[in-house]
Image (cartoon, rainbow, N blue to C red):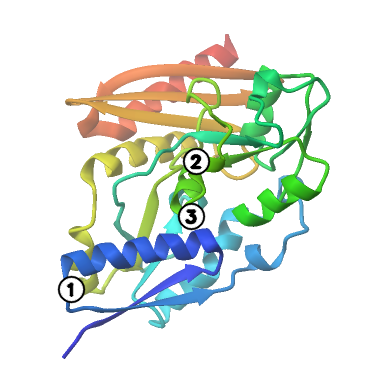
Amino acid sequence: MQKQIIIGTRASILAVAQAELTKRKLLEIDSSLDVVIKKIITSGDKDQRTNWNKDNKSLKDMFVKEIEKALLEGEIQLAVHSMKDMPECPPEGLITGAIPLREDNRDIMISKTGASLMELPAGSVIGTSSLRRVESIRNLRPDLVIEPIRGNIHTRIEKLKNENFDGIILAYAGLKRVGLAHLATEIFDVHKIMPAPGQGALCIQCNGNDTSTIKLLSKMNHLETSIVIEAEREFSRIFGGGCTTPMGCHGTLIGEKLILEGMYYTQDKIYKGKVVGCKSNSKNVAHKLAGVIRGQIDG
């Protein structure tokens, strides 16, 4: 009998594109599978008005909790999430079955005129709702105006065209996955705007007792990406990472070494650090980096 796999995903264009990518990878592993994509409308998708940076609710929970409920209840066999949307602790019974090869984790800007961030006139309006991006841009261009912007990629691009924005900041990975990479005016070096922990990576989640799906997903897991993501998310956890925490982290593997860089904004200042450690103990490297940054803050 043909095995059916139902993938749960948010209904946004980007989320569906990520689910389609996962579907293709599953069929490469086993072409006999019957893979179906089920779109689930989340609370975060329904509410496009709330400024979550001023609210105590977790935006991460708002984007994943309905999908995780469907997974726990057996309506779907696996769920595809953007890793940076994932809360630190999953519900009991759910596990990360795979972290595929990561897409480009850098941030980009799309500007109306094609100007780069440093070329924009003083007073230009930049759209972003990420506090990490807000503080990074303010550090680079304190003379710009930064306004919140919500919605999926296409919605934000329309707002750039039709509203009082001169530029918007987005994740490059999302733009690439929906076929709009050519719109990027500027791709920011990670040292200019540090990416969010886990940005560009996918989390393929499944039920912890679903042994057949776990076995299938193990063939999709990219070990090097998993090591880097574990370190970045541990750094995020140490600093209470969330949608209201202005922080970034970027890991790179070279041989057996893990190079981890991070930024944290507090007390009206951006603190940055860089450490090198052994990839076999990625969490320890994250704690080492956190210690360097805390030393700067306390010093």
Q: Position of residue 71 (x, y in %)?
A: 41, 74
Is residue 227 placed above or below 155 in the rendered structure?
above
Callout 3, which amino acid? Val
Residue depicted at 33% across the width and 26% down the height: 285
The answer to whether residue 152 shows anywhere in this view is no
Q: Secondary structure at mark 1?
A: loop
The front one of 115 and 235 is 115
Whether residue 275 is visible to the viewer of this picture, yes or no, is yes
The amino acid type, in three-letter code, at marker 1 is Ser
Outermost residue, bottom direction? 1
Above or below for 219 versus 102: below
Q: Nearer the viewer, residue 106 or 54?
A: 106
- Secondary element under disc 2, as helix, strand or loop, is helix
In the rendering, at what x and y percent does residue 37 appear? 41, 75
Left or right: residue 32 versus residue 140 is left
Looking at the picture, which amino acid does disc 2 mark? Tyr
**How far separated are the C-alphas under marks 3 and 1?**
24 Å
* Residue at 43% in and 42% down: 198
* Among numbered discs 3 and 1, the one appearing first in the sequence: 1
Q: Position of residue 267 (x, y in %)?
A: 70, 21
Query: Label 2: which residue?
Result: 172
> Which of the numbered marks, if any, corresponds to residue 31?
1
User: Is 237 located above or below residue 69 in the figure?
Assistant: above
Q: Tag count in the figure? A: 3
On the image, the x and y values in percent for residue 204 come to 35, 60
In contact (CB < 8 Å): disc 2 and disc 1: no
C-alpha span from label 2 to label 3: 10 Å
How packed mark 3 is, by other alpha carbons closer than 10 Å (few <14, some 14-19, many 20 or more), is some
Q: Please report whichever mark, 2 or 1, sits nearer to the chain's N-terminal start.
A: 1
Could you tell me which secondary element the residue under label 3 belongs to?
A: loop
Reading the image, the residue beneath label 3 is 178
The answer to whether marks 3 and 1 mark residues whose Cβ atoms lie closer than 8 Å is: no
